[in-house]
Image (cartoon, rainbow, N blue to C red):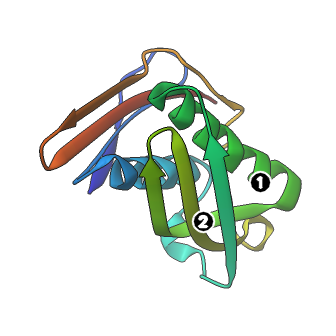
Amino acid sequence: MSYEYMEHTADKKIKASGKDLAEAFGEGALAVYNIILNTKKVEAVKQHRLEIESESKKALLYDFIDELLYILDVEGFVACKIKSIEIKGKRLTAYLVGDSYRNYDHHGDVKAMTYNEMDIKEEKGKATIIFVVDV
């Protein structure tokens, strides 16, 4: 139920954890959005649904973060809350709540998701993901 930014030479390295993989993915999503703006100031006025299917868990994480950046670039949507994420095998369904990022002061930019240093660990009652985004 948390995330942190780890040291990285040029980009942002994120470590997110939760009670399961879905919660860790949600924390990772909020960490990405917090690079761009303070999500605590974003109002929950819009909802966005994502459905992604990938070839592996790492590909699913990559595709999820990539899709978040896509909807930010194309629709201007930024999430302040992850209403729900469900991961079944290599399929993810997420409901995000947020607003247009244009309504808020933003202080950063995320260019792309990478596979650089990506790691996914699942244990009983805890999941941790580590990934790097290009800023």
Neighbour tally class for label 1: few under 14, some 14-19, many 20 plus, Cα within 10 Å: some
For residue 107, say whether it is visible.
no
Q: Quadrant of residue 130?
A: top left
Report the front residue among 69 and 120. 120
Q: Is residue 19 visible?
A: yes
Say which label, 1 or 2, has the lower sequence index: 1
- The mark found on residue 71 in the picture is 1
Q: CA distance from mark 1 to mark 2?
A: 10 Å
Residue at the spot 69% in from the left edge and 69% down from the top edge: 48
**Mark 1: secondary structure:** helix
Residue 40's spot in the image, x, y percent?
A: 48, 72
Q: Secondary structure at mark 2?
A: strand
Please, which residue is most extreme toward the right here?
A: 74
Horizontal relation, residue 111 to residue 74: left or right: left
**Looking at this rendering, what residue extends furthest in the bottom direction?**
45
Q: Residue at x 54, y 18 (%)?
A: 115
Quadrant location, the N terminus:
bottom left
Figure label count = 2
Establish if 105 lies above or below 26: below
Locate the C terminus and report the quarter of the image it occupies. top right
Disc 2 packing (10 Å; few <14; some 14–19; many ≥20): many
Please tell me which residue is depicted at 60% across the width and 82% down the height of the picture.
Answer: 44
Front in this rendered view, residue 23 or 76: 23
Point out the residue furthest to the left here: 124
- Which amino acid is tagged 2? Ala
Q: Is residue 104 left or right of residue 35?
A: right
Residues 92 and 128: in front is 92
Q: Position of residue 54 (x, y in %)?
A: 60, 33
The residue that disc 2 covers is 79
Seen in the image, is 2 located left or right of residue 103?
left
- Indicate the amino acid at tag 1: Ile
Q: Residue 92's x, y, as percent?
A: 54, 50
